[in-house]
Amino acid sequence: MQPYEERLTAPRSWWFIALLVGVALALILLPLGTVPMLAGLVGGAALAAVAVSSYGSVRIRVVGGALVAGDARIPVEALGTPEVLGAEEARAWRTYKADTRAFMLLRGYVPTAVRIEVTDPGDPTPYVYLSTRTPEKLAAALQAVRA
């Protein structure tokens, strides 16, 4: 059983912007006729929707004794105590406090995050920064797997 799973979906406004991309492409192709305009509307909106969907499809899971964040799979034994970050502290850790060696799965539209020290001496990554809408639940799930 999975104690935690979250998908960092893109906000609804991004889907509206994807539609507007299709409308803009349709207006660009309007002088070429109705068929190219409709093709631009459908094609532009579809391509923009695919981009929004792929960006918003990243998942964070705690499963099988490991933290799975995007493409990364990190054993919980290699992680320290999770630190729940509020909006201001999360912004600080993704800007001026950030370390270039850190693994960061961040989404600008998610204000809160969790920061977890990497305790594996063979790993040069100092910490893992994960944007999450429910940082307390993620930290609790990591602590539950560790116990």
Image (cartoon, rainbow, N blue to C red):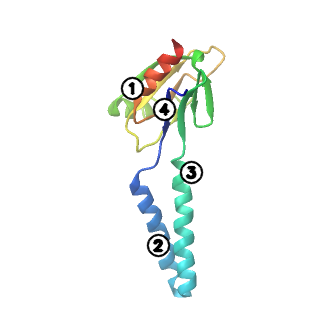
Residue at 43% from the left image edge and 56% from the top image edge: 14
What's the distance in space between the residues labelled 2 and 4, CA to CA? 34 Å
Foreground mark, 4 or 1, reads 1
| The one of 59 and 92 positioned closer to us in this rendering | 59
Left or right, 99 with respect to 92, comes to right
- Of callouts 1 and 3, the N-terminal one: 3
Left or right, 68 with respect to 10, comes to right
The kind of residue on which mark 1 rests is Glu
- Of callouts 4 and 1, the N-terminal one: 4
- The answer to whether mark 4 and mark 1 are in CB contact below 8 A is no
The kind of residue on which mark 4 rests is Leu
Image quarter of residue 93: top left
The image's mark for residue 136 is 1
- Of callouts 2 and 4, the N-terminal one: 2
Mark 4 surroundings: few (<14), some (14-19) or many (≥20) residues within 10 A: many
What's the distance in space between the residues labelled 4 and 3, CA to CA? 18 Å
Residue at 48% from the left image edge and 17% from the top image edge: 144
Mark 2 surroundings: few (<14), some (14-19) or many (≥20) residues within 10 A: some
Left or right, 1 with respect to 91, comes to right
Residue projecting furthest to the right: 122
Percent of width and height locating residue 43: 57, 70
| The one of 134 and 64 positioned closer to us in this rendering | 64
Whether residue 85 is visible: yes
Residue at 54% from the left image edge and 72% from the top image edge: 42
The kind of residue on which mark 2 rests is Ala
* Residue position for label 4: 130
The image's mark for residue 54 is 3
* Residue position for label 2: 24
Residue 95's place in the image compared with 14, above or below, is: above
Foreground mark, 1 or 2, reads 1
